[in-house]
Image (tube, rainbow, N blue to C red):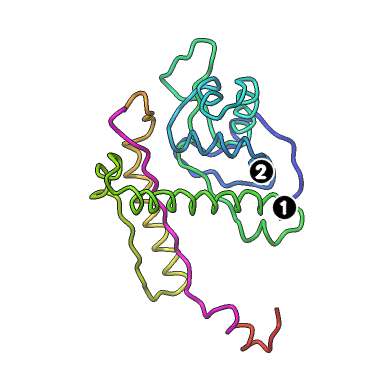
Amino acid sequence: MPDEPLTDDEDAFPEEGEQLQVDANALRGLAHPLRGRLLEELTRNGPATATILGQRLGESSGATSYHLRQLSRFGFIDAAPGRSGGRERWWRVRPGGWSMQGHAFLADPRTRAAAEIVLGRYYHQREEHFRDWRELVLERPDDPDVRRWKDSASDSLSHLRMTPRETREFTEALYGFLRDYTQRFEGRTPESHPDTDGVEVQVNIFPTLPPRREREERGGGGS
C-alpha cells in the first residue's frame, strides 16, 4: 500500500460504531511503543485524560498528549462524549474497535517490520495477561481478588469441523454478538464504577492443521 499523508478529514474514518480497518499508515503509527501502551490502557480501563494516563504509565503529560493526538489522527481513539476535563480532553477507544489484515501486512516487505512489532506486542500481551491470572490462582488461592473472581472467570476449548466459509460466518456472528453485548459497558472507568474490574475476553479461531514438521515432510522437506 503506498504511503499517504495523515489526515484530519472526518470522512476518512468509519461512522461511530463501525469497525476501523487499519491501513499501512495507521499500522506504522501504532508500532510506536508508547502509543501501544496508551491504547491498551484506554481499552482496559476506559476513558482518561493525558494527565491521568501519564500518571498511570509513568510518562509526562506532554508525551502522552502528543501520542494520544496521533492515535486520534490514525482513527484508533476519539474524544469521549459527555466528559469535561477543563482544558484537558478525555479520550476513549473509538467505538466499533479495529481490525487489520495481519497476514497481508506480514507478507509485504514495506509493512512487515511494523506488523511484526504490532502483532508481536498484541500476542505477547494476550499470553501475559492470561498467564498472570493462572499464576495468581495457583500461587495465591486465598487472595481476595481470586476468591472474588474464581467462580466467574472461565476458559474453554471447542473443536469444530467447518469449511473456511463456514468459519468466517461463525466468526462474524460471534464477534457481532460480542460487539452488541459489550456496548452496555462502554465508557466505564475505575473511578466511575469502583465495584468493577477489567475483564478480558480472548477468542482464538484457527484451523488445527498438521504439525509443521509433518507438512514439511509431505512437501519433500521444503521450508
Residue 118, relative to residue 208: is it above or below?
above
Residue under the point 41% across and 74% down = 162
Dominant SS type (magenta): loop
Q: Which residue is mark 2?
A: 31
Residue occupying the far left of the picture = 151
Q: What amino acid is found at the position of numbered circle 1 in the picture?
A: Ala
Q: Residues within 10 Å of mark 2 (few under 14, many from 20)?
A: some
Q: Amino acid at mark 2?
A: Ala
**Where does the magenta region start and end?**
194-214
Residue 223: mark in rendering: none
* Marks 1 and 2 in Cβ contact (< 8 Å): yes
- Residue at 38%, 46% (x, y): give it: 179
Q: Position of residue 105 (x, y in %)?
A: 67, 56
What residue did someone put label 1 on? 113
Q: Is residue 60 magenta?
A: no
User: To which quarter of the image does residue 32 belong?
Assistant: top right
